[in-house]
Image (cartoon, rainbow, N blue to C red):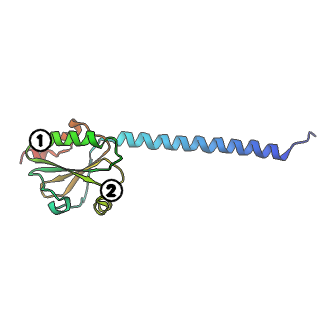
């Protein structure tokens, strides 16, 4: 019967274990990244949304709808989202765009469960949150997020 060194077997087993853990972590991180990328820019309907008043935003609500953008100083895509939403609000007087620094308004970010920036909430004319968008957004996605019922007001 050949002699086996228990230390050598332990080091090979621990190496294989480390490789297996690394592969699992990489697969998990890739899966999370793909899900986040797939959801980016897509408006999700909010059921039983919170109501925000002009006082909460320190800005007036739009006549038909208001885009509330939560940003942060380190957010790389927040500037592009700001340009999209201010451009859309400039072309339609019934729409408003309000940008909030999530780091300065932690109370509001926590109340609304803002976990990443940019996150855009779409409010109806009463201030009710009706849509939620996370990540970068195109002008087409922003316009499509506004419910049809607000266009006829």
The answer to which quarter of the image holds residue 110 is bottom left
Q: Is residue 83 left or right of residue 107?
A: left
Q: Position of residue 87 (x, y in %)?
A: 16, 39
Task: Please tell me which residue is depicted at 49% across the width and 43% down the height of the picture.
Answer: 29
Q: Nearer the viewer, residue 130 or 87?
A: 87
- Farthest left residue? 153
Q: Quadrant of the N terminus?
A: top right
> Mark 1, residues whose alpha carbon is within 10 Å: few (<14), some, or many (≥20)?
few
The answer to which quarter of the image holds residue 88 is top left
Q: Position of residue 22 (x, y in %)?
A: 60, 42
Q: Is residue 59 left or right of residue 1?
A: left
The answer to which quarter of the image holds residue 33 is top left
Task: Name the residue that disc number 1 marks.
Answer: 90
Comparing marks 1 and 2, which lies closer to the viewer? Answer: 2
Q: Position of residue 80 (x, y in %)?
A: 26, 39
Task: Please tell me which residue is depicted at 86% across the width and 44% down the height of the picture.
Answer: 5
Q: Secondary structure at mark 2?
A: loop
Sequence-wise first label, 1 or 2: 1
Q: Are marks 1 and 2 in contact (CB under 8 Å)?
A: no
Q: Position of residue 106 (x, y in %)?
A: 32, 61
> Mark 2, residues whose alpha carbon is within 10 Å: few (<14), some, or many (≥20)?
few
Task: Name the residue that disc number 2 marks.
Answer: 103
Task: Please tell me which residue is depicted at 15% across the width and 53% down the height of the picture.
Answer: 124
Q: Secondary structure at mark 1?
A: helix
Find the distance from the CA under tag 1 to the CA under tag 2.
Answer: 26 Å
Task: Please tell me which residue is depicted at 21% across the width and 53% down the height of the picture.
Answer: 130
């Amino acid at each position: 019967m050949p002699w086996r060194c228990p230390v050598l077997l332990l080091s090979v087993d621990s190496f294989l274990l480390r490789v297996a853990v690394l592969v699992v972590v990489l697969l998990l991180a890739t899966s999370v990244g793909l899900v986040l990328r797939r959801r980016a820019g897509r408006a999700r309907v909010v059921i039983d949304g919170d109501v925000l008043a002009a006082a909460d935003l320190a800005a007036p609500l739009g006549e038909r709808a208001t885009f509330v953008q939560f940003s942060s100083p380190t957010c790389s895509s927040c500037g592009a989202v700001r340009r999209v939403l201010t451009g859309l609000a400039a072309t339609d007087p019934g729409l408003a765009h309000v940008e909030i620094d999530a780091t300065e308004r932690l109370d509001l970010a926590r109340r609304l469960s803002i976990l990443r920036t940019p996150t855009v909430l779409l409010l109806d004319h009463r201030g009710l949150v009706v849509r939620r968008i996370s990540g970068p957004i195109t002008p087409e996605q922003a316009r499509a997020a506004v419910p049809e019922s607000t266009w006829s007001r």
